[in-house]
Image (cartoon, helix red, strand yellow):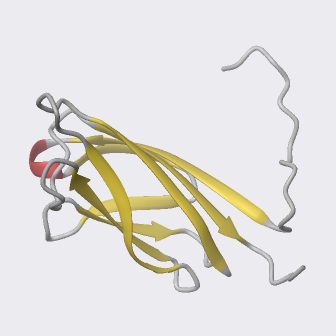
């Protein structure tokens, strides 16, 4: 726990922004070994490197999915995450982990960690 007093609310031009955070530990064959997520859950799809995010609530719009992969990889290789489908009004997002060396979907190695931040709009107010 941090030794400071954090204040609620971020300064933003948009009204009703919601930020959800998660830490997902990967097990064998890209399957999820454990997850610490607030406001959503994540599961490996039938395809390698594709994960389905299920939101606990429905939202008006998706503004961003920011993800980092902490994975043991060979030199010159890395992995990044891209959004491949989303319907936040129905509570779903699909992401794909992509290998930077060949651009193909790839599983995260066992013991790897996926860090997620999801920014959503929870308001119908338009400026």
Asked whether 83 or 3 is in front, the reply is 83
Relative to 106, say whether 60 is above or below.
below
Q: Where in the figure is residue 103, as x and y percent of width and height?
A: 18, 59
- For the C terminus, the image quarter is bottom right
**Which quadrant of the structure image shows residue 28?**
top left
Residue at 76% across, 63% down: 17
Q: Nearer the viewer, residue 60 or 1?
A: 60
Kindly tell me whether residue 59 is visible in this rendering.
no
Q: Position of residue 20 (x, y in %)?
A: 60, 54
Give the left or right position of residue 9, taking residue 96 as reference.
right
Which picture quadrant has residue 78? top left
Q: For the N terminus, which image quadrant?
A: top right
Quarter where residue 96 is shown = bottom left
Up/down of 77 relative to 84, above or below:
above
Could you tell me residue 74's position as x and y percent? 11, 30
What residue is shown at x 52% (from left), y 78% (from top)?
A: 91
Left of 24 or right of it: where is 49?
A: left
**What residue appears at the point 37 percent right and 62 percent down from the top-left corner?**
82
Whether residue 41 is situated above or below residue 67 in the rendered picture: below
- Number of marks in picture: 0
């Amino acid at each position: 726990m941090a030794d400071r007093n954090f204040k609620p609310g971020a300064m933003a031009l948009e009204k009703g922004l919601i930020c959800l955070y998660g830490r997902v530990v990967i097990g064998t064959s890209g399957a999820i070994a454990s997850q610490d997520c607030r406001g959503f859950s994540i599961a490996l799809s039938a395809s390698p490197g594709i994960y389905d995010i299920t939101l606990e609530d429905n939202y008006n719009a998706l503004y961003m999915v920011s993800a980092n992969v902490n994975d043991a990889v060979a030199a010159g290789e890395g992995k990044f995450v891209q959004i491949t489908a989303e319907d936040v009004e129905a509570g779903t997002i699909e992401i794909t982990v992509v290998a930077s060396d060949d651009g193909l979907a790839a599983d995260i190695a066992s013991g790897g960690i996926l860090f997620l931040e999801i920014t959503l709009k929870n308001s119908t107010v338009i400026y």
